[in-house]
Image: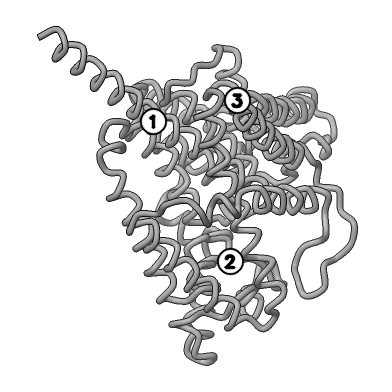
């Protein structure tokens, strides 16, 4: 009993620091030497969360029994990390980047602890509050700007995320989970989330969301009608709704779109950089894209998760990442088959979104996505285990009575 209380107390501390990190605003302190970002309050609280999680769980991780598939995944990830650090020009920052990515996995496994020891509803409670606060902040700015014609309130626009793409990623992933999964929310909350997403000014966020809902959702007819209505509405309103502008894209518009052309140019620059720097197979390490990627006239991100992985990790590690993902999917194929829509829909949304954005590996937005997908996955796994226990118990009762 005492051990159980201590264990739950440890989980509470991990969850507390995770929520503290999630609610931490992006307060900037100073530029980190050798990096492209500032030291911010949310990065500091992320490090606290990661250090606490690692400290509490490391001994349990070492003692835990691991099946062959788990060992394969760990070995591949360790190999990828070592190569990444060795090829990086700044090894210290590369180690920091690896730990940054590890904190996202910590968020995924934290959701397992919360689902098993508490409940799905309790685990998502504070994240639900956070996402709704962000949606309302953004809608307040949108109404003030578009309805009343005032200047934008930039402190409220896109909530705590400050920019459209990570805001749309988290909002879209959470909205899909609430519409597809077992977690239910009020109609008012659904309206707020959908409105904030459609006015998020993120074309890929809104586009990936609607495409996912049309392909996998039981509401596909409603979303096809919504997309059709939105398409015709764009011809009769004066305002430019950037998030919905993907509906009016034609081949000519796509071929002339500055944002897409910038990504194509960066891809071409990356292939030339591969040849000149001989980095195609092992990658260039942390921030390698800064050698060639140009965004709005100065060095900047590639704005594609897949291109970023190819640039930083190289083709060999990129293929190994695919092997890791495929191994995990195959190993959990029965679970996925039983809960196909609930598990695959957020993954499909993120996969489409990542074609032209790096939000999945950004601070906070990536952590929230891993946490939300983890809640769905571990909840489905717990339900399957409970069904097995009930089935075996029934078999024993029937056998005993027989």
Give me the C-alpha separation between circle 3 and circle 2.
52 Å
- Left or right: where does residue 193 sit relative to residue 72? right
Q: Residue 59: where, in percent of width, then height? A: 59, 53
Q: Residue furthest left?
A: 402
52 and 94: which is toward the camera: 52
Q: How is the image coloured?
A: one colour
Badge 3: residue crowd in 10 Å (few <14, some 14–19, many ≥20): few
Give me the C-alpha separation between circle 3 and circle 1.
27 Å
Q: Residue 106: where, in percent of width, then height? A: 59, 48
Element under disc 1: helix
Q: Residue 181: where, in percent of width, then height? A: 42, 25
Give the residue drawn at x 37%, y 69%.
Answer: 319
376 and 154: which is toward the camera: 376
Of circles 3 and 2, the one toward us is 3
Of circles 3 and 1, the one toward us is 3
First in sequence, mark 3 or 2: give its number: 3
- Left or right: where does residue 196 sit relative to residue 27? left
Q: Quadrant of the C terminus?
A: top left
Does 294 appear above or below 192?
below
- Left or right: where does residue 395 sit relative to residue 177? left
Does 66 appear above or below 349?
below
- Left or right: where does residue 151 sit relative to residue 58? right
Q: How many marks?
A: 3
Of circles 2 and 1, the one toward us is 1
The residue wearing badge 3 is 1
The residue wearing badge 2 is 302
Give the residue drawn at x 77%, y 30%.
Answer: 141
The residue wearing badge 1 is 380
Badge 1: residue crowd in 10 Å (few <14, some 14–19, many ≥20): many
């Amino acid at each position: 009993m005492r051990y159980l209380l201590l264990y739950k107390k440890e989980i509470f501390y991990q969850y507390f620091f995770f929520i503290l990190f999630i609610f931490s605003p992006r307060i900037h302190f100073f530029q980190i030497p050798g990096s492209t970002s500032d030291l911010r309050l949310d990065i500091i609280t992320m490090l606290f969360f990661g250090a606490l999680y690692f400290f509490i769980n490391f001994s349990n991780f070492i003692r835990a029994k691991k099946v062959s598939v788990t060992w394969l995944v760990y070995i591949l990830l360790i190999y990828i990390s070592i190569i990444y650090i060795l090829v990086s020009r700044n090894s210290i920052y590369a180690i920091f980047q690896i730990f940054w990515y590890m904190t996202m996995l910590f968020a995924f496994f934290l959701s397992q602890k919360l689902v098993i020891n508490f409940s799905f509803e309790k685990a998502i409670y504070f994240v639900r509050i956070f996402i709704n606060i962000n949606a309302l902040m953004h809608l307040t700015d949108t109404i003030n700007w578009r309805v009343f014609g005032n200047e934008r309130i930039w402190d409220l626009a896109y909530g705590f995320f400050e920019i459209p793409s990570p805001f749309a990623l988290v909002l879209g992933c959470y909205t899909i989970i609430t519409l597809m999964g077992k977690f239910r929310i009020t109609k008012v909350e659904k309206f707020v989330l959908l409105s904030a997403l459609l006015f998020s000014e993120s074309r890929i966020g809104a586009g990936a969301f609607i495409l996912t809902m049309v392909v996998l959702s039981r509401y596909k007819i409603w979303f096809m009608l919504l997309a059709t209505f939105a398409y015709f509405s764009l011809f009769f309103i004066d305002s430019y709704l950037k998030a919905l502008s993907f509906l009016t894209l034609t081949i000519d518009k796509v071929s002339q779109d500055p944002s897409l052309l910038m990504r194509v140019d960066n891809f071409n620059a990356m292939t030339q950089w591969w040849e000149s720097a001989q980095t195609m197979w092992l990658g260039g390490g942390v921030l390698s894209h800064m050698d060639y990627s140009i965004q709005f006239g100065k060095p900047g991100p590639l704005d594609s998760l897949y291109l970023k992985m190819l640039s930083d990790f190289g083709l060999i590690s990129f293929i190994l990442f695919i092997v890791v993902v495929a191994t995990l999917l195959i190993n959990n194929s029965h679970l996925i088959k039983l809960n196909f829509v609930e598990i695959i829909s957020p993954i499909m949304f993120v996969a489409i979104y990542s074609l032209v954005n790096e939000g999945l590996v950004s601070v906070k937005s990536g952590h929230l996505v891993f946490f939300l997908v983890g809640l769905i996955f571990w909840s489905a796994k717990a339900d399957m285990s409970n069904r097995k226990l009930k089935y075996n118990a029934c078999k024993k009762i029937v056998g005993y009575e027989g």
